[in-house]
Amino acid sequence: FANFLSQLTVSVSQHSGLLTMQQSNSTASNHTQGAVAPSVVLGLCVLVGVPGNAVVIWALLTKLRRVTFTVKLMLNLAITDLLTLITLPFWIYALLATWVFGSGPCKFLSYIIYCSMYASVLSVTLMSVQRFIMVLYPQAKLWLRRRGENAVLLGIWALASLFASPIIKVRDVVEDSNLQKKCLPRTYSSDSERVVLLLLETLLGFVIPYSILTTSYICLTRRVKQTTFASSTRLEKVATRIVVAFFVFWLPCHVFNVLKVCAILLKTSNMDASAKLESVWEAGNDVAGSLTFLNSCLNPFLYAFASRSLWKDAQEKGVLTA
């Protein structure tokens, strides 16, 4: 009987180990399948966006004799998009497999992503404000030149660096629910800190900039309708496309930020609702995040629409190189 119990124990143990291994393999397989869609999107962004933004940078630097502030902002935006996109191979590998690059690269690459994101948002916002000021208050062009356009551009990167700095503290390599190493937020001191940082990210990265964008372009459109400047009208169409693209591709990411905030706030009062929101966040956050990179991939094509107007204006003013 003792031998029988011993054999039975061994048999159950082996069977249990086999089931555990099968479940683990099944979970890993499901995880990989769920990562395929965002990985494909990110891969397409690399293949299309990196050469596209590189061409934009090359064209702006080599084809114009005199670089205006608008062109500088477009160049700044292309640089931020390129910086964002060249980090994607690391994230694609981590999505499909695991994070093998260590804690330092996790923090550094995350910081590059967030810094570039804020610099891109600030560049687009400043582009809209600059167009608004130039049309309504042409004399401000001289004021800006006196104060220094380069100082404004440095200010964009200074603010972006400041806004992105919390990510260095909170990002690290962690094991997720599938026992896969991921570069994820880790060292929040409390749920309150996480809520504050998520809300700041949404406010600084979307709500405030988009409010400024829409206000500037609404006022600018009203002004342009009262003028006969065809080139301004063409540029307004391009500007509108940039604003719409910014809204479409960034909105899902910040919606999921808000879902995460709601899940955290409901932990104590409604655990079931919190768990459901958490599951929705886990299911869609990677996809929503991957969509933001499509904006960086799309911007060169928006510039292509603008190039005819920009190059025609530049040719008329004698600032286009041969």
Image: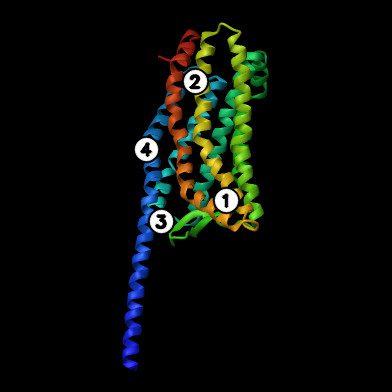
Amino acid at circle 1: Ile
Quarter of the picture holding the C terminus: top left
Instruction: Determine contact: label 3, label 4, CB under 8 Å.
Output: no
Determine whether, in the image, residue 43 is placed left or right of residue 213: left
Determine whether, in the image, residue 135 is placed left or right of residue 29: right
Amino acid at circle 2: Val
Q: Give the SS element for disc 4.
A: helix
Residue that badge 1 annotates: 168
Residue 67: image location, x then y, percent: 52, 20
Residue 320: image location, x then y, percent: 45, 14
Q: Give the SS element for disc 1.
A: helix
135, above or below 250, in the image: above
Q: CA distance from mark 2 to mark 1?
A: 35 Å
Q: Give the SS element for disc 3.
A: loop
Q: Residue at x 47, y 14 (%)?
A: 309
Residue 89: image location, x then y, percent: 40, 45
122, above or below 33, in the image: above
Can residue 151 be seen here? The reply is no
Q: CA distance from mark 2 to mark 4?
A: 23 Å
> Furthest residue to the top?
228
Amino acid at circle 4: Leu
Residue that badge 2 annotates: 238
Circle nearer the viewer, 4 or 1: 4
Determine crowd level at label 4: few under 14, some 14-19, many 20+ residues with C-alpha closer than 10 A: some
Residue that badge 3 annotates: 98
